[in-house]
Structure formats: structure tokens, C-alpha cells
Amino acid sequence: MRAVLTWRDKVEQCIYDLAFKPDGTQLILAAGNRLLVYDTSDGTLLQPLKGHKDTVYCVAYAKDGKRFASGSADKSVIIWTSKLEGILKYTHNDSIQCVSYNPVTHQLASCSSSDFGLWSPEQKSVSKHKASSKITCCSWTNDGQYLALGMFNGVISIRNKNGEEKVKIERPGGSLSPIWSICWNPSSRWESFWTCRESEDAEEDIVSTYFQELPSALQSTVYSSQGSEAEEDEPEEEDDSPRDDDLEEHNDILAVADWGQKLSFYQLSGKQIGKDRSLNFDPCCVSYFTKGEYILLGGSDKQVTLFTKDGVRLGTVGEQSSWVWTCRVKPDSNYVVVGCQDGSIAFYQLIFSTVHGLYKDRYAYRDSMTDVLVQHLITEQKVRIKCRELVKKIAIYKNRLAIQLPERILIYELCSDDAADMHYRVKEKIVRKFECNLLVVCANHIILCQEKRLQCLSFGGVKEREWQMESLIRYIKVIGGPPGREGLLVGLKNGQILKIFVDNLFAIVLLKQATAVRCLDMSASRNKLAVVDENDTCLVYDIHTKELLFQEPNANSVAWNTQCEDMLCFSGGGFLNIKASTFPVHQQKLQGFVVGYNGSKIFCLHVFSMSAVEVPQSAPMYQYLDRKMFREAYQVACLGVTDADWRELAMEALEGLEFKTAKKAFTRVQDLRYLELISSIEERKKRGESNNDLFLAEVFSYQGKFHEAAKLYKRSGHESLALAMYTDLRMFEYAKDFLGSGDPKDTKLLISKQADWARSVHEPRAAVEMYLSAGEHLKAIELSGEHGWVDMLIDIARKLDKAEREPLHLCAYYFRKLGQPGYAAETFQKVGDLSALVRLHVENQHWDEAFALGEKHPEFKDDIYAPYAQFLAEKDRFEEAQKAFHKAGRQREAVRVLEQLTHNAVLESRFSDAAYYYWKLSMQCLSIAQDPAQEDAMLSKFHQFQHLAELYHGYHAIHRYLEEPFSFHLPETLFNISRFLLHSLTKDTPLGISKVKTLFTLAKQSKALGAYKLARHAYDRLQGLKVPDRFQKSIELGSLTIRSKPFHDSEELVPLCYRCSTNNPLLNNLGNVCVNCRQPFVFSASSYEVLHLVEFYLEEGITDEEAVSLINLEAPRPRWDSKWQEVTSNNSQTLRLDETTDAGGDGDPFTARLSFEGGSEFVPVVVGRSVLRAMSRRDVLVRRWPAPLRWQYFRSLLPDASITMCPSCFQMFHSEDYELLVLQHTCCPYCRRRMDEAGP
């Protein structure tokens, strides 16, 4: 760091304070009783401001730049505008010592000897607060929340915006160490300002403004900064990644300078940071740089000293002839202004040099003057080494790092041999003060450059060798070598270039040129030397012949590529120049200095920033390709080119038949097609093929140069390959031209391939026509079918011969797929495939055509009726389905379908459907029972299914009564159904039928109808069953209330046996039979009342047909139930009482057969022919069951009460009930036979 005086002025009065306008254009000084306004650019006094009557002690500018304030010994504060006009004045009781504007709210703090005031533009009033001692200085925090006050008694008081004291810092010196200057570090405010810049141009402007007139990187390498004092603490290494700790360190840190000659730092909480720094002079002012990285301190030592933000002394800005009362940094710059006791004003520019070192991909540079940052340019890793002293020189080589401090040199080494390792540890310390221009480190030595002299020192500080040069040393670089024997490349001001080995006293002169050396580099093989001279010319020499190979202008630095011997780059004039071999230079824009070139990465230093720039090596690669130098071009490409460049290299090498290079290049771009081509060519070459024309033809065909490839194919005698190429590429016109009048087979093959192409390019009609002309019927049919062209398929099918079965079958397949079964049938008939024709009719459900075909060809009946039955079953046409299953001979399938439907109906609580399906099953079993082999089993199932149908039919009413909100049945009906079910459920209960629901219904209806005894019995039985929660409460309540009823049943509900006239109990242990005569009751299928029917049986020898004929005779018979005789004469009819008739005669012969004399066995009523003749057909109901069952006969004992029997299911109903149900359902409620259907 060095200070350059920009301008100086002197006034007669002492300069107590000064302030910059925030934009840095003006400087306000407090001089005597006036304010002086200066132009900061050239020191011109713009205007003196008069307003105070006594000495002005302080001045401060508002952050927004709109106003500034001044305080004077006349006890007044004046507010001035930026146009230098006074707008407001207020006073204190004592002289004003300091003023300060809040950086956020622009509130003004003015401090006097006894109090301080707070004034804001909004309030227009001053709030004053008493102070315990004289206030000497004040400063606001960056966020404007707190104000620090420095007192003459050594106390620091931190107040909030309202003036209330929040923190009080009492320093050990007390009144013996009055606080004279304080300042908050502004870094937090300016860090946010710095990072919020939105464009790179804006950032570059700030950087260039802040570091004006910096020397070039190479100059700073030679001319290093001056040093100053530093602490002796051990350097620390730390990762340089961003941390919150760093932000905390910078936020709200107060620098305090007192007249106890100490510099101290405090946090906002009042906690001291570190120890007091001894100054050895009385400080009068302390101020921070804009970003808070440095501190300026002036006082009784008559100079301004620069410190780091941590208080490490860096150097002197400028020495004065009297005390320095004030010093400030121009905002956003490195300019410093100093005001002195004798009225001197000095304006300095600080220039900071770059101290750095580079070796391959590791770059070490100075940061914050006291730290060293080592950056890995490839991985972007950084490590910070805190030296806590001014870093003067840095050198880096392989795993060594040398840092020169004011009083010592530290040697570091990497902790491991890992190339990516960034952890350094101290290897040696040389505790001596050295003055040198350049510092170089080797494996075991350090090299110091002092003007014309080079000294080689061991790490122990022992001087081993010394070289004296003829001229000033301008450049020095380590060019490698074994440890302890490294070579150095040295350039002198007189143009001499030498090579020195650290273990050899004698320097080797490589060459001598007329101009001074500015930069040097040697190629990787050490055959060529590149020099940049003071005229900005890059010169390249052959080291062995000393011949100048070429020279290029506009260069300020040069570097050879470490991986390619013939490539170098140099920078200058804002451009990067890359030169390969002797080819012309390739240029691209680049700011900065080239300091290294490794592969495709160029290391560039711009201002303080070192970056690795990825530069594609495309231009030099193409320069080699133009000269067919494929191997050299491949070496350049390996340094780093784009994928497109790799592909171009591969193609060029392939056309040049340089297969080895082409294979490597295609491998880079992972082009398997060309790799397979190269592999096949290499295999053929191994087998002895050597026709380069053929190889090149294949290369051209792969590249799309088809006509050139065809010519080469023809020249090499492989016309067939050219034809195959054209057809594969769908270039059929070219193929026809190429063929001319050739073989017809080739022409046909060409047409077929052309059709394939037309198909692939979505011209299917043209493709079909081509396929047909080429005889490819299958492909034509397939393509027509895929596009749904029925007309074309019809045309093809009718033109084909019936012997061509495969194409015709394919036509039929597409007819079926396209919904044209008629044409498919026509095609199958043409082929004669009846089996396929049957399947077609079945698939399309053309049953009439299928049945007609089945009549002509009985062998297909099973293939027709089985699917037909399945179709009917899916349509719920079960009767027809069963007939179809019968016709197909699949009776088991018919039964199984109905069983599954029945089971599903039960599971879904559709009990009416279940009853219907069980009835259908029973009739199906009865039909199957006609087979003698299955008669017994099927009859057993018939009776079982009939019984289940009756149960589910009755339970349907119970289920609806309990599950639905309204009842559709009379209480008597529900009562009868419940009794019927209980008497029928003597064994296992069928699936879905609930005894609980049955008993619950019986109990409720019994209670409602007066059958209290039966109701009590039902409730008692419910107590032993598991009752659902929703019925539990009702059952418990019913069980209690039934106890209040008499223990008997209503006689009106007692059922009567119409055979023996016995009253049966409501709860019959024998079931649904008479307790006396054991005659089974016949129930109505709707009301479940006992019908007045008695079943009778025929005597042996009487057939069903004979019995019916006898009943139908309707022979006249006497009325045995009356003694009146009717006498008819010619003119009258007379009734006469025949008293001679024996009242005890036989009467009705059927009634006589009903007599029964008790017993445990059931005795059926058997009638003969005479009784049958005596019966009226109106009184007899006959169930005409199909074989093998016998018919059942029932005699009505109350002929006046009409009973109707369904002719399909043979269930009995009261005629009125049946007619009503038929009107409601339009069918039988039991078997669902519609009225317009005939019975079985």
C-alpha cells in the first residue's frame, strides 16, 4: 500500500472536523467560525459558509445527501441544504461538541458539554437529554436504532432512538482516559449495498472507482507493497466458505479511540472484542473505510495510520506537520482527506498492490492485507490462512507455500499428496527481516530477488548460493526439476534470458534480445521459449538454434500449453490469442492477463480475481484438419473441444481413411453407427480386403453422399450394393436409373421395396397397388385391413383363387374385424371353411343362419347351441337358455348357471328372485330326471329346490316387513307366513333366512292378533338367539309387555283340518300337518292360509289319463246332502220331501273316505273309479307334473270358495287374491308366468 498526494490546501484556522457529501463530489470542512466547501476532484474551494459566531467544532452530512449540519462553540446547530443554504437553527446550553445523522431515519443527534438533542425533519422539534459528563463524540449504528456517545469521563453510553440509555460501558482508565473518537463499522450496510448491484457493468464501475490506477499484475509482482507492524500470533488456517460468524463479526462493532492511547473494539451489547491495542499517541479521530475493511486513525503523532478492521497496523497514509484532528475516506473510493491543527488539508489516493503467486491450478493471493487465500482453480475450493500481520510477498510451488511477513518468512506444505488437498501446515519459519522485490519457493529452498541479485536460502534461513546479474531482474519463474535441483527461468531488463539451477553457481544464458523482458515461459518439452518484451511483442524462439520462429504484436503476458507442445496463448488489448504451430492466430475477447494454460483451461487474472476460463480448442484443431494432420488435430481436440468439433474431426479422419483417429473421435461422441462401420472395415481389412474404393463408398453412404458412394460401388464392381443403398433410402427413381434394363426379378424386388417405402411414408393406397403388382397379396391385404378399406379387400378377395387359402383367410379376418360379417361369410364359403363360418355366425349372434347351418351339418350343433345358451343366460332369458343347453347336451351348465344366480340372489337379499330361481332349478332337475340314469338324484334335488323355493317365497315378505318402512301385507298374512316358516325350518336353516326375524315377526303379529300365548313363546325363543342390536330394544320391550297379556290364544286364529275337522294348535310340533290325521296342509301361496283342499290318491291300476276322463264325465248323481226330491211333469215342477230316504246312508262317497280313526301314521285318501265318476271336475284340482312324477289330485271341500291353481308352478291361491296379484304383476307371483304364455 502506498499513498499518492492528489491535492493540498491550507487555511488559517484549525480543521476540527470534515464531512463528505454521500456522492463524494463535495467536501465540507469546519475551519474557524466558517464552513468551507471544496470540490473533491481538484481541491477547488467552492464556497465558504458563514452562519456561526464562534469556532465550528463539528459537521455531518445526511445519508440521503439532502442536508448537512454543523455545530459550533456558539452553542448553536445549523441545518444546511445540499444547495448550501441554511434552513434551520437551534441551540443548546453549552458549546456543540459533535453532530451525527441517523443513516436510516435522518434524525440528527447534536451533543454539547452537558446534554444531547435529537431533531428530525418530521417532528420539527428538538428533544434534549442530560448527560453525566461532557460528550466528546457520537456515532449511529448502521440500522439507525442506537446512538453511541463518547464521554470525557471515559464512559461510552449507547442510547436508543428516543435517547434512553440501553448500554453503559465503563472503561478502566476512567476520566484519565477520555473517549475522544468513536465509530461503528459500516460493513453490514455496505455489504448489502455491494451485493445488490444488478449488472456486471455496475460492479465493474465500482471496482474500478475503488481501485483506481492499480499497477498491472506483472508490475505488482515486481514492486511489492510496503510493510508495517504485525502481531506475533501464530497464523491460522481456515476454510474460506461463507459463515454466519463473519457477518456477526462485522455487524455493529464499535471502534473506540481514547486519550489513554488505546484502540478498542466493542459489540453492541457492551462486550469488548479482543484486547486494547496500544497506539503510543493521543488519537483525535477514527473512521472506517466505506466497506469497513480498514480503519483510519489520526492524532498527536502528526500522521494518519491505516489499520485493518481488527486493529492490525498496516502503514502510514501521510505525515503532517501538526496534529491531525480529523480524517475521512471519500465514499466508495480509496481517497483519504486529512485535516490538521495548522489548517492543512491533504487529499491522498491509496494504491493497493496485488500480492500473489500461481503454480499450475493453485493460486495464492493476499486478502485484507493480512490474510492469504489459496484457491484451487479447477475445484474452486478455497482456504484462508490468517497471518495477523501484513503479507508482503507470496510464492507457491507444488506442495510448498511461502509467505513473507514484515519480520519473518513462513514456509507451508500440504498435509497430503492428494491433488485436491487444500490443507496446509507450517513446515519452517525463517525469523529474519528481508528486503526483496520477488520471492520464489522451491522444494527445499527459497529464492530472494533483490534488484540485480538472486539469493538462494535453505528453509533454515542459511544462504547457500548467490547470483549477481548484469541488469535488473524483471521476471523469474520455477520451471521444475528434481527436489533441490530445480531450474529457474530469469528475464532481465537488458533483454538477457538465463536458466539457473539452484544447485549450480553458474547461470546459463539461453539467448539475448534487444528489448527488456516483461514475461517468459518455456514449452513443456523445453524446446521453445516465449518472451513478451517491453514493446508488448510476443517472440517465440527455438532454444537450441536461438532462431526466432515467429512474433506477434499486442501481448502483455504469454503461457505455453502444458499438455500440448505446439500451442501457446497470449493476452493483450482486451483479446486472448491462441496460436498452434505456425498457423495464424485465433482471437477472442478476454479481459485480464494470461498466467497459465493447461489443456483447455486458461488461467486469467483480472484486477484481483483469478479465474479458470474454459476455452474450446476448435480453431487450432480445424487448422490441423485443413492440412490433413489428423493425429495432431486429435491431440488438440483432447484438450477440449465441443461435440460438434469431435464429430467433424471424426468425419474428416474417416474420409481420409485414418480409421484409428476416427475410431477414437467417434468414441468420444458415442456414435455407435460409425463405430460399427469402422469395426466392420477393420475386420474386413484383417481378412485381406484392400479395396479402398469400397471402404470409401461405405463411408460416403454413411455420410449421406449417396451418388458419390454409388459411383465408387460401381467402380469397385459392387453394383448390387449401390442398388441396395438406393432402395434402403427410398430413392427408387435413382435406383431405376441405376438399373436401366436389368433383371426382372430385381425390378420386382425394387417394386416391393418401393411399396414398403410408400407404406412407411403414409401413402398406403399406393403401397397396396404396388404390393398387388408385385404379387405380395398378404402385405396388400394386411395394409388394406389396417386402414379399413373394405372395398379394396372385397376386390382382392373376389379376384383371388379359392386355392389361395392364406390370403383369403386373412381377408376374412379383416372383414370380421371391420364389422363386415357378410363378406367374411362369403369368403369362408369360397374357401369351404364351414367351421370358421359357424364361429362367424356365433360371434355376430346371427343365430338363424347358425341354426340353419346346424340343421344341414349336425356336427356343429354343439358349437352353435352352447354359445347361444350362454348368450340367453346373459340376457336373463333362462328358459330359452336351458333349452339351448339341452340342445347342446350341456345340462350341467344349465343347472350350474341357475345355481349361481340363485346364490347371488340370496347373498343380495333378493329372496323373491331366489325363490323364482330355485323353482326354475327344480323344473330343470325334473327335466333332467327323465334320464333313467339320473332319475333318483335329480328327483331328490327337485323336491329340495321346490321346498327352498317355497321357503324363500314366504321369507321375502318377512324381510320386506322388517327392512322397509311400510308393510305391504296384512297382519294375518305375516302371521301365517311366520308360522309356515317356523314349521318348515325344523332342521337346518337355509342361507339368508333369519330365525330371529321370523320369530320377531311372529311375536309382533301374534300380539297384534291376540295370540298372546304364541307371542310369549316366540319372545322366549328369541332370548336364546343372538339378536342384532337394532332389534334388541324392541324385543326386550315386547318380552316385558307380553307378560301383561292373558296366557291364551284367540280361537279365531286356530287352523282347521278340512279332512278330520280337527282344530290344530298354532304351534305344531309336527310341522305343517294335522296333529290328528297327519294330513299335510295345502297353503295359499299368497296369504298362506290353510286351503280347504284334501289330496287324494288313485287306486292301483288307474292311470292319470283315465282318472281325469272319469272326473270329466260329469255324470248325473244324486244330491246326498238333501232329502228334497224334484218331480217334473208336463205342466209343473214339484219339490217333494222324501222321508223314506235313509238319513244314515253312505252320502258322498269321497266324504266317506275322509273318515279317520286317529293314529301316528298318515293314511292317505285313496279313491277308485266309482268315486272319481262321482266327482265334479269343478271341485278337483290336478297338478299335472311331467314324467317321471305322478300327477297330484286335490278335492275342494268348499266348492263355493273358489281356488285358482297356476298352470305353470301348480301353486294354489284364493281366486280373488290371484286375480289381484296378476293385475299388479302381470304374471304369476310365484313362477312369473305371463298370462299370455301357455302352461307346461
Image: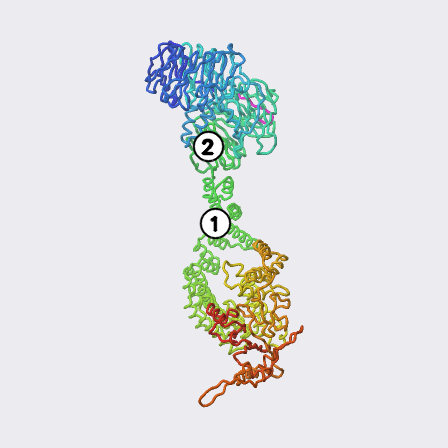
Q: Name the residue under label 1.
A: 655
Q: SS class of the residue under badge 2?
A: strand
| Colour style of the rendered protein structure | rainbow
1146 and 310: which one is in front?
1146
Q: Which of marks 1 and 2 is in front?
A: 2
521 and 907: which one is in front?
907
Residue 906 picture quarter: bottom right
Residue 137 picture quarter: top left
Q: Which amino acid does label 1 sit on?
A: Glu
Left or right: 17 as drawn, with respect to 1112:
left
Residue at 48% x, 86% y is 1134
**Residue 783 within the segment the image draws in magenta:** no
Q: Which amino acid does label 2 sit on?
A: Phe
285 and 323: which one is in front?
285
Tell me the crowding category of disc 2: few under 14, some 14 to 19, or many 20 or more residues within 10 angstroms, Cα based.
many
Q: SS class of the residue under badge 1?
A: helix
Residue at 44% x, 34% y is 577
Question: Residue 187: which numbered mark, if any?
Answer: none
Residue 1022 can be seen, yes or no: yes
Looking at this rendering, what residue extends furthest in the right direction?
A: 1160
Q: Is residue 735 above or below residue 1122?
A: above
Tell me which secondary structure the magenta stretch mostly adopts.
strand
Q: Where is residue 860 in the image (x, y as percent from the top left)?
A: 53, 75
Q: Is residue 400 above or below residue 1004?
A: above
Magenta part of the protein: which range? Answer: 442-449
| Proximity of marks 1 and 2: CB atoms separated by less than 8 Å | no
Q: Which of marks 1 and 2 is nearer the N terminus?
A: 2
Q: Name the residue under label 2.
A: 570
Left or right: 759 as drawn, with respect to 1092:
left
In three-dimensional space, the C-alpha distance between marks 1 and 2, rounded to whole angstroms, equals 34 Å
Q: Where is residue 703 in the image (x, y as percent from the top left)?
A: 46, 51
Q: Position of residue 184 (x, y in %)?
A: 47, 20
